[in-house]
Image (tube, grey):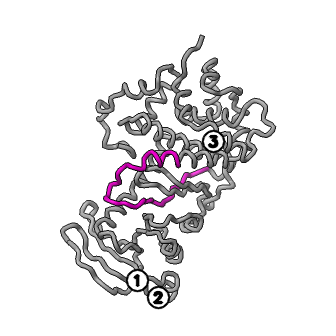
Amino acid sequence: MNSGKTVFSQLMDFLPSYEFRLCVERYHGNYKVKSFSCWDQFLSMAFAQLTYRESLRDIETCLRAAGEKLYHMGIRGKASRNTLAHANEVRDWRIYQDFAQLLIRNARELYLGDPLQVQLDQTAYALDSTIIDLCLTLFPWAKFRKRKAAVKLHTLLDLRASIPTTVIVTTGAVHDVNIMDELFWEPGSIYVMDRGYVDFSRLYRIQQDSAFFVTRAKKNFRCQRLYSHKVNKASGLRCDQTVVLCGFYAQKDYPDKLRRIRYFDQQTNKALVFLTNNFTLPALIIAQLYRCRWQVELFFKWIKQHLRIKAFYGTSDNAVKTQIWIAISIYVLVAIVKKRLNLDHSLYSILQILSVTIMEKTPISQVLSQFDESEQMLDDSKQLILFN
């Protein structure tokens, strides 16, 4: 007789099941569904993410091999390849988007007190995007180039918690600056972004919403200096100026003053020019804050390497977005478990442990605490670690 809960079931207990049912009801996800519910679909896809399954047939084979353990994992319906493919095809992906957003809010509350890499009281975000290449023949709806398809993940990352607060999935042809029209700018918060988001009319909307931005100037940037402030050149700073834009259309798009900071990075031997509308923070903090933007690059590399979002189980728009949002949910779930169990392991280590112990009936806290991460330091310099 089976007794106790599997590690997979214990992990899923951290999910708010009532809120998941509300998301399903909001989009009528279980309408005319007899056996394989949205919860069964989510658990099957979560199992695939945690155990690195390669295909729908791979998922089906592994779940059927589990036999009676499926009931104790919470999966009540028969998880066949065709059933799962049909569910990914027709069930609204917004169910899993809303549920992921709920998990994100919970995770951000847990990491609210964590320190930022720079001394900063405000909330800081990094805005960036990454492209996932696809086959144009299989994904004709995601046309990107003449002979290439792709989807793009536009992500707003909370730099304090390394948690994605907003993820917008589009085809690869959508330009980054267009996403700025869909975002809500929190008053008092700081948004760090690269040169691809330099559009002065959109940056001025951030200014009007009482928020702040930090970005890099393009090579053809033209301005008129109004004031210069003293800087400590030993820290790498070269200038701290108050400027206004030159050019009729540039002044029309951004009629207010800007702050221009020039910084020499000794590590890369490059001179960087930053633009911001924040005139109160020290210039060195602005430069250090832009360096924190690298966390969103680490996030993209991490999920591409450790979650299944580069190979998709379905080819439709709905199936791709469903898989992406469930992958994000698993990422955030592991971050929540790490915080609630007070674990010192990296997310990479936790996922590796879960992948080989998912069917065991051992307390999850015991499974994760027995591992000594200090012994696994041979190749630590190459690991992508978001949570130390």
At numbered mark 3, what does the secondary structure look like: helix, strand or loop?
Answer: helix
- Quote the CA–CA distance across marks 2 and 3: 52 Å
At numbered mark 2, what does the secondary structure look like: helix, strand or loop?
Answer: loop
Q: Which residue is mark 3?
A: 19
Q: Relative to residue 89, is residue 364 depicted above or below?
A: above
Q: Which segment is the magenta one?
A: 105-134
Q: Residue at x 39, y 36 (%)?
A: 342
Q: Amino acid at mark 3?
A: Glu
Residue 62 rendering spot, x and y as whole percentages: 60, 25
Foreground pick, 375 / 230: 230
Q: Which residue is mark 1?
A: 222
Would residue 69 be found to the left or right of residue 87 on screen?
left
Residue 175 rendering spot, x and y as whole percentages: 56, 66
Q: Which residue is mark 2?
A: 247
Which quadrant: the C terminus? top left
Foreground pick, 281 / 191: 281
Is 123 one of the magenta-colored residues? yes
Whether residues under marks 2 and 1 lie with C-beta atoms below 8 angstroms apart, the answer is: yes
Q: Along the polypeptide, which appears first: circle 2 or circle 3?
A: 3
Task: Please tell me whether mark 1 or mark 3 is closer to you in this view.
Answer: 3
Q: Residue at x 47, y 40 (%)?
A: 336
Foreground pick, 148 / 343: 343
Residue that protrudes farthest toward the top in the picture: 1
Is 6 one of the magenta-colored residues? no
Q: Quadrant of residue 153?
A: bottom right
**Residue 384 seen in the figure:** no
Q: Residue at x 48, y 60 (%)?
A: 128
Q: Residues within 10 Å of mark 1 (few under 14, many from 20)?
A: some
Residue 374 rendering spot, x and y as whole percentages: 29, 32
Foreground pick, 311 / 101: 101
Q: Amino acid at mark 1?
A: Arg
